[in-house]
Image (tube, rainbow, N blue to C red):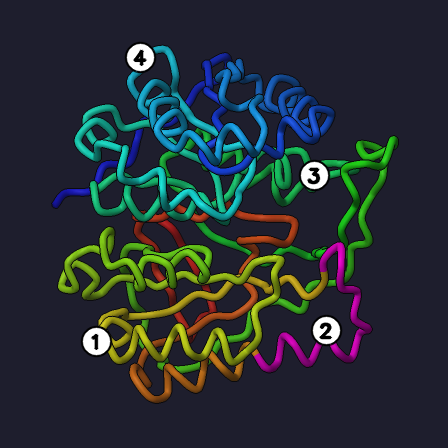
């Protein structure tokens, strides 16, 4: 199937705001307002909030069909050039049965979201439509303090350009959590720290392929349900992208998911793997520096161990800026990317 990259946006375009996952926007309307203001003021876009995006968790959980209808409506609207998810969640998988991939392919529109929204992105991949793992409103566009220049640069490319072009590593990063309940949320800057840059391992041959994947927990759901995975041969030569969530899965959990991909004959089909910078702390767990570094190291070793077993010639790059940390790059799921281990460069095209 030929892949479609939805048309790029222009300043002044209308974008839809939907809640395909949870009702976080209802719980934190001030954070939604901050994100909407940034879409208007920083990106000169005209956001239109769908009624479901202001519903709470109880309604959205009880009405997966309504969430699907909002997605269909946004994609079908000829005035809408982009669709933004408010936040992630934990049950978007239940929405997919109510979506019509033919409607999504017939009305290709740029979609921005991450975490639980990986569900929709994998469905779009099967339909041959490129989407963007990033640019989610509450936790990326509406991040507290100043919008990082790195995030703004790559979101602009994901909005207004055909490709992201050359990818850089962010100079600073954070997984510091600022509570939505803070009265001064918008003015509170998280604790940023120097970014160590990328770590390369595995094969040394330059490879080019289409990105498949996203949040590893959601990839695991798709392995378990086996309802929305592409035909295995469609993954031949693709680039696997994975990142872990704020739930901080153990290295053993990461290892087991990749082992299952390996035993199904899927892990060996990818020509390369890119791994997002992992979140090492959350609102409930604040480990010290040694524990945080150990978590990163153990996860990296878990990934490398399974690649050594099932796909030893594949290049792998760790600590890309996509996923649950900030700043972020909206990774084009279904888009083409070239990895050159010798030059240690990543380029989307």
Residue 292: numbered disc: 2
Residue 190 locus on image (x, y percent): 80, 48
| Residue ID at (60%, 64%) | 278
Mark 3, mark 1: which one is toward the viewer?
A: 1
Task: Return the residue at label 1.
Answer: 265
Q: Earlier in the sequence, mark 3 or mark 1?
A: 3
> Label 1's element?
loop
Picture quadrant of residue 279: bottom right
Q: Nearer the viewer, residue 130 or 30?
A: 30
Q: Nearer the viewer, residue 15 or 265?
A: 265
Task: Return the residue at label 4.
Answer: 78
- Mark 1 is surrounded, within 10 Å at the Cα level, by few (under 14), some (14 to 19) or many (20 or more) other residues, namely few
Counting labels gives 4
Residue segment shown in magenta: 282-298
Q: Earlier in the sequence, mark 4 or mark 2?
A: 4
Task: Return the residue at label 3.
Answer: 143
131 sits to left or right of 326: left
102 sits to left or right of 307: left
| Residue ID at (25%, 30%) | 104
Question: Spatial distance from mark 2 to mark 3, Cα to Cα?
Answer: 22 Å
Asked whether 135 falls inside the magenta stretch, the response is no
């Amino acid at each position: 199937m030929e892949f479609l990259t939805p048309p790029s946006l222009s300043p002044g375009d209308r974008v839809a705001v939907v809640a395909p996952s949870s009702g976080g926007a209802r719980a934190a309307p001030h954070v939604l307002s901050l994100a909407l203001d940034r879409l208007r003021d920083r990106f000169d876009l005209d956001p239109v909030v769908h009624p479901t995006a202001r519903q709470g968790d109880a309604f959205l959980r009880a009405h997966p069909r309504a969430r699907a209808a909002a997605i269909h409506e946004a994609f079908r609207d000829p005035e809408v050039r982009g669709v933004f998810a408010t936040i992630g969640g934990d049950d978007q998988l239940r929405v997919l049965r109510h979506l019509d991939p033919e409607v999504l392919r017939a009305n290709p529109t740029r979609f921005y979201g991450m975490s639980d929204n990986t569900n929709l992105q994998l469905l779009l991949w099967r339909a041959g439509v490129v989407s963007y793992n990033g640019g989610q409103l509450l936790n990326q566009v509406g991040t507290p303090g100043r919008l990082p220049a790195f995030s703004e640069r790559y979101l602009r490319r994901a909005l207004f350009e055909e490709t992201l072009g050359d990818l850089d590593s962010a100079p600073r990063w954070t997984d510091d959590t600022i509570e939505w309940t803070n009265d001064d949320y918008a003015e509170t800057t998280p604790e940023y720290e120097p970014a160590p840059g990328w770590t390369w391992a595995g094969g040394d041959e330059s490879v080019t392929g289409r990105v498949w994947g996203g949040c590893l927990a959601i990839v695991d759901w798709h392995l378990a349900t086996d309802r929305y995975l592409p035909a295995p041969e469609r993954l031949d030569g693709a680039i696997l992208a994975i990142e872990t969530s704020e739930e901080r899965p153990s290295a053993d959990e990461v290892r087991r998911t990749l082992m299952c991909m390996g035993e199904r004959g899927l892990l060996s089909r990818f020509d390369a793997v890119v791994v997002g910078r992992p979140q090492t702390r959350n609102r409930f767990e604040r480990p010290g520096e040694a524990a945080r570094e150990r978590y990163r190291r153990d996860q990296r070793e878990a990934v490398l161990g399974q690649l050594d077993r099932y796909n030893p010639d594949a290049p792998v790059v760790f600590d890309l800026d996509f996923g649950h940390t900030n700043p972020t790059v909206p990774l084009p799921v279904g888009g083409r990317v070239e990895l050159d281990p010798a030059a240690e460069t990543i380029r989307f095209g």
